[in-house]
Amino acid sequence: MLALDWINQHLPGSKKVATPPLFKERGQDKSCALIQKFKREHLELMDFLSEANMALGRYEYWNVPLSLERFRTVMEAHLLDENVNLYWCLEDRLIRNPDGMKVMREFRREMLAIGRSVREFIRKYRTEGIGTDNHKDFERELHDIRNTLAARLEREEQQLYVLYRA
């Protein structure tokens, strides 16, 4: 049972939450809805990184970790959702398409590496804190992460999601 199903069934008065599509239930409308959800989350992820950058530019060091934590939370949920509802489905659908399978696996490996880098970045600055002594280092690393992630998300939307819709 999915967590959302459990919440809907066991928490009286809770707002009903739509269950994301699964492989066996996925139709064209549902796959489009899932892709649109992922695209919205991509925008949200980039917004949180922009918030962190703006707070840094204003020397509001106390606000940077808040934006990073919101980013981390959405990123972790997004990656889990992609693993369950996108990559798993693609693995099954592309079994007879070695070129598509190779593209999908490269995307998956790349995102795992980016996820590790982002987690290390957040962990580092959660431990060290952010202030005048490491402002420039943090700014440079944040810029690198934003550029890497933006390029990846654009490629994902243009190449990987096409395989899912096919």
Image (cartoon, rainbow, N blue to C red):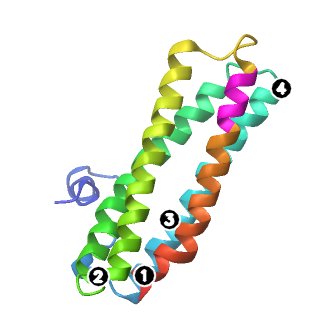
Instruction: Judge left or right: residue 114 versus residue 112.
Output: right
Instruction: Judge left or right: residue 154 versus residue 20.
Output: right
Instruction: Residue 75 in the image: state x and y as whole percent.
Output: 48, 47
Q: In which quarter of the image is the N terminus?
A: bottom left
Gap between marks 4 and 1 measured at Cα: 42 Å
Gap between marks 3 and 4 measured at Cα: 30 Å
The amino acid pointed to by label 1 is Leu
Q: Name the residue under label 3.
A: 38
Gap between marks 1 and 3 measured at Cα: 15 Å
| Labels 1 and 2 touching (C-beta < 8 A) | yes
**Residue 7: which disc?**
none
Instruction: Residue 32 in the image: state x and y as whole percent.
Output: 47, 81
**For marks 1 and 3 on the same chain, the one whose residue lies earlier in the sequence:** 3
Query: Could you tell me if residue 16 is visible in this image?
Result: no
Secondary structure of the residue carrying tag 4 is loop
**For marks 1 and 2 on the same chain, the one whose residue lies earlier in the sequence:** 2
Instruction: Residue 65 in the image: state x and y as whole percent.
Output: 60, 26
**For marks 3 and 4 on the same chain, the one whose residue lies earlier in the sequence:** 3
Secondary structure of the residue carrying tag 2 is loop
Q: Name the residue under label 1.
A: 163
Position above or below: 9 against 114: below
Q: Name the residue under label 4.
A: 58
**For marks 4 and 2 on the same chain, the one whose residue lies earlier in the sequence:** 4
Q: Tag count in the figure?
A: 4
Quadrant of the rendered structure where residue 166 is?
bottom left
Q: What stretch is highlighted in magenta?
A: 136-142
Taking the magenta stretch, the answer to whether it contains residue 62 is no
Instruction: Judge left or right: residue 81 versus residue 89.
Output: right
**Residue 94: which disc?**
2
The amino acid pointed to by label 3 is Phe
The amino acid pointed to by label 4 is Arg
Instruction: Residue 152 in the image: state x and y as whole percent.
Output: 57, 59
